[in-house]
Image (spheres, coloured by chain):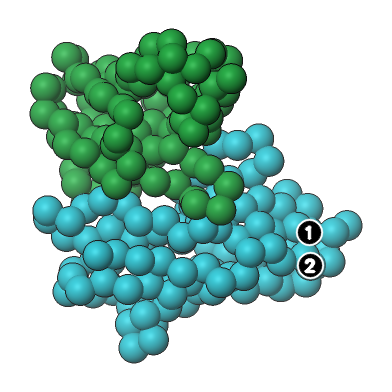
Chain colours: A cyan, B green
Amino acid sequence: AQKVTQAQTEISVVEKEDVTLDCVYETRDTTYYLFWYKQPPSGELVFLIRRNSFDEQNEISGRYSWNFQKSTSSFNFTITASQVVDSAVYFCALSGNYGNNRLAFGKGNQVVVIP
Amino acid sequence: DAGITQSPRHKVTETGTPVTLRCHQTENHRYMYWYRQDPGHGLRLIHYSYGVKDTDKGEVSDGYSVSRSKTEDFLLTLESATSSQTSVYFCAISESETDTQYFGPGTRLTVL
């Protein structure tokens, strides 16, 4: 079974500080996919990134970056120079390969950016 | 943004009444999903569909049924709503079973 753990429930940072969200996953699949979604206070779920298990390259998109390490089963997300608009709940999710494609979500990290 | 709408967006109903939530997509994606979101649980899969008339259960399917008679519509029915089904319900779509799932705006359901 797939499992995702996001240990930090709520994280408060002052604007312009960096914040890192930890995501640890468990799976028996050799091919799997990892995701991050953002849920702002308005409630919608916004897709941020998808990463295949065979691609360990880190990724940067503007102020967002992701660090994927298969050796520690982690897919961490860093927001650099946080802004008030980054205040949201962030979910890490995992799906397996064919026949095991159900998306398993972590419980989310509530990020509060204080101006 | 993926073309996904959900209706109604908010609903208040009483215990024991039937409720149907609708998800409509304009992307012609094969896969559609229903999730519920509750505090402390993240999102949990209720049912999903991999084609017209093809559906399967998720991890929290008890008390729910689904139907998909057209590619663009996926209906979630609570035959007899209970207070434990008070939740926010999200629909999602994906092109294939391993592709990214894109979510609709959600429906907030309150069962009194």
Image coordinates of residue B73 in percent, x first then y, are 27, 17
Q: Quadrant of residue A68?
A: bottom left
Q: Where B37 falls versus A38 (above or below)?
A: above
Question: Chain under label 2?
Answer: A
Q: Quadrant of the C terminus of chain B?
A: top right
Residue B99: image tag: none
Q: Which x, y percent locates residue B35?
A: 39, 38
Residue type at tag 1: Val
**Position above or below: A60 against B64:** below
Q: Which residue is at a point 35% across and 66% down the rendered structure image?
A: A3
**Mark 1 or 2, nearer chain start:** 2
Task: Mark yes or no: residue A64 visible.
Answer: yes
**B37 and A38: which one is in front?**
B37
Q: In the visual, does A20 lie left or right of A84?
A: left
Task: Answer yes or no: is residue B93 visible.
Answer: no
Q: Which residue is mark 1?
A: A113
Numbered disc 1: secondary structure:
strand
Screen quadrant of the N terminus of chain B = top left
The answer to which of B100 and A92 lies nearer the viewer is: A92
Query: Which one is nearer the viewer's eye here, B14 or A99?
Result: B14
Q: Amino acid at mark 2?
A: Val
Q: Are both tags, 1 and 2, on one chain? A: yes
Q: Residue furthest right?
A: A115
Query: Where is mark 2, residue-wise?
Result: A13
The image quadrant of residue B74 is top left
